[in-house]
Amino acid sequence: VLSELMEEVRKSVDQDVDGVEVLKELLGSSWLQSLLKVSQSASWLALLSAHDTVAQKDYEPALAPIPDELPDEEEATRVVCLVKNKQPLGATIKRNEITGEIFIARVIHGGLADRSGLLHAGDRIIEVNGFPVDGLEPEQVIQVVISYLKHLLYVRAMVDYSPQQDPSIPCADAGMSFRKGDVLEIVDQSDALWWQARKLPSSVACAGLVPSSNMLKRKQREFWWSQPYQPHACVQTCEFDSSHLLPVTRYFGLFFFCPSAGFRRSMRLCRRRAHSVTQASCHTRCSSSCSSALCCPYEEVVRHQRHPEDTHRLLALVGPSSVGVNELRRRLIEMNPAVFFGPIPHTTRAPRGYEESGREYHFTSREVFDNMVYNNRFLEYGEYKGNLYGTSIQSVKDILINGKMCIIDIEPNAIQAVRTHELRAYIIYVKPPPLERLRESRRESLITTNYYINRPFKDEDFQEMEDSARKMETHYGQFFDHVMVNNDLQDSCVQLLTAVTRAQDEPQWVPSGWIRPTPE
Ligand SMILES: Nc1ncnc2c1ncn2[C@@H]1O[C@H](COP(=O)(O)OP(=O)(O)OP(=O)(O)O)[C@@H](O)[C@H]1O
């Protein structure tokens, strides 16, 4: 460029253009020549390149997009961006108990919020970082702020992962293995493919490499398609879950005032019958466990402490058939019938002489029952001897709304139905003890099977229980909040009581969607 310019100047000198002599002198000066040499040196070019890269980045905090539905008056809603340093924010919040709206209670003089001039006592908070806060407890709003400020993400792993068996990991030694159900603190998400995480509870400062959510989904899809003839994990789930073809509940006869051991047998027969005759596609049958893991290998969770005024969490027991979930549930209710309740099921069967609608069952017509099924009003339902039986979501809610603890036992395929923002189920998995202990502890106990009511346990019953426990853990283990071994019955009752008390009174990891409503 310079030589072209010099040539132009030379031509202008020949044409005696005004002032060009000065320009010629300037261009020929030694300092300009030195400057030009420097400008072509590698370090100068690197400096310029660094400048351009940095200049292109936007270091200003980005404001959340302005909500679509702003009130008419232009100034009624303000979008405020506070960049927090290590000082406290200097503002407190309160909730209007009637409307559930969240307000700034006070702004501390001289604090960050005060100095920003952006927050004032009495301002109503509508959203924090995109999460609507109406109806949340102040502690929950603070949770939302904290998790954003810390830029930390907590997830529950829905799958197992081992870096040693992953050829695509950049460095297996830097990788971190995890099992489904583990809670991970994701400390770095800057790489789209490999995140850095710590397993909780953790005392180690050093994080490990784990696949990002997208990476894990890709791996699962590749694995799925690469194994057409192999019985991969999902297929095993389907085979195991064939008992879930017909949804059924397993505890209708177990209210301690209800003399209906026969009915309980009916439900078991119903389940087993479904096992043998009904056919369904793999997709239908394993939707709750497999596809959810496929589309969401990590579930975002937050640490949550139930507020004393909140309804209790639903307590849901799962376990292989005959492990003792009904027995444990019955004993828990018996121990404290003023606190623990089981929901009252619906049935289309005619009431017997001593039965009253709303006590043993809600007796309904088939039409009403079908309508409820159609409107997804049941957690589980099933048919036996031409009659329908089901546990409605409302019957569970009725107990919770009355401030009681609701305890149910469910088939594993109903886990997804109870893991909701409304019911916030705490899943307790009841596991059989090792074979030797099973033989010993069940020596005096009786089992109900397809063909016999109350016959002594046999070795094949124990074997079946162990097999089904193994498969249940493999396919649903990620959803278990607590695992207990039902060895000695007395000990198990104490363990269960401790677990359910903790579930209600101590902080727990729960899906973040239960605490922060997901924006529509
Ligand atoms: N820890 C235990 N020690 C000895 N016997 C037990 C123990 N737990 C349960 N039982 C007995 O085992 C039998 C089966 O228990 P229960 O009916 O509760 O099984 P379940 O898990 O509800 O199975 P299903 O859903 O098939 O009815 C019952 O007779 C029960 O009293």
Image (cartoon, helix red, strand yellow):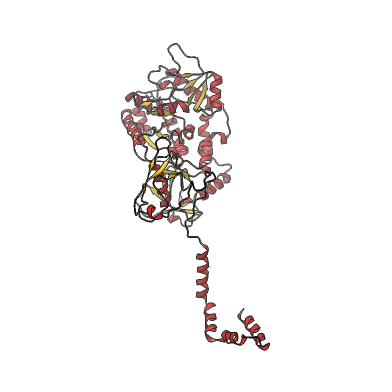
Q: Nearer the viewer, residue 88 or 442?
A: 88
Q: How many marks?
A: 0
Quarter assignment of residue 303: top left
Rendering coords of residue 220 (x, y %): 53, 46
Q: Residue at x 53, y 34 (%)?
A: 239
Rendering coords of residue 207 (x, y %): 40, 54
Q: Residue at x 49, y 20 (%)?
A: 347
Q: Farthest residue toward the front?
A: 73
Residue 490 visible in the snapshot: yes
Q: Farthest residue toward the top?
A: 353
Rendering coords of residue 464 (x, y %): 45, 30
Quarter assignment of residue 281: top right
Rendering coords of residue 447 (x, y %): 41, 23
In the rendered view, tell whether residue 446 sits above or below residue 312: above
**Quadrant observed for ligand 1 in the rendered image:** top left
Residue 323 visible in the snapshot: no
Q: Farthest residue toward the right?
A: 15
Quarter assignment of residue 444: top left
Please state, as top left, top right, bottom left or bottom right, where the N terminus lies in the image: bottom right
Q: Residue at x 65, y 87 (%)?
A: 13
